[in-house]
Image (cartoon, rainbow, N blue to C red):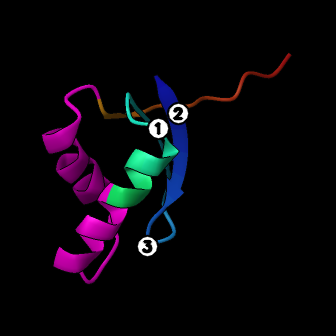
Amino acid sequence: MYYYRIFDDKEELNFFKSSLDYAGIAGLLKEYEKKHSEYVNRDFIKFLKEKDKDAEIIEVTNIYY
């Protein structure tokens, strides 16, 4: 699995995991751009899940000690 962080047009930060490498994600992002005028992380992940069933947004939490 590969882990990524993304910011969308609403300045929301999310992290997601995918079985696709960076080149695969970059190619799908170009395909996504052709059909969408706005970047929204949840929409991109939905689109990504059509190509990679293992893709999902993951929750990242800070631990302080």
Image coords of residue 7 (percent x, y): 51, 62
Q: Secondary structure at mark 1?
A: loop
- Residue 10 is tagged as 3
Q: Which of these two is toward me, 14 or 50?
A: 50
Q: Is residue 65 above or below residue 37?
A: above
| Residue type, label 2 | Tyr
Q: Secondary structure at mark 3?
A: loop
Q: Is residue 25 magenta?
A: no
Image coords of residue 36 (percent x, y): 21, 77
**Residues in magenta?**
28-54
* Contact flag, marks 1 and 2 (Cβ < 8 Å): no
Q: Residue at x 46, y 22 (%)?
A: 1
Residue to which mark 1 is pinned: 21
Extreme residue toward the top, this view = 65
Q: CA distance from mark 3 to mark 2?
A: 21 Å
Q: Residue at x 26, y 83 (%)?
A: 37
Q: Is residue 35 left or right of residue 22?
A: left
- Majority secondary structure of the magenta segment? helix
Q: Residue at x 29, y 74 (%)?
A: 33
Image coords of residue 8 (percent x, y): 44, 67
Q: CA distance from mark 1 to mark 2?
A: 9 Å
Extreme residue toward the right, this view = 65
- Residue 3 is tagged as 2
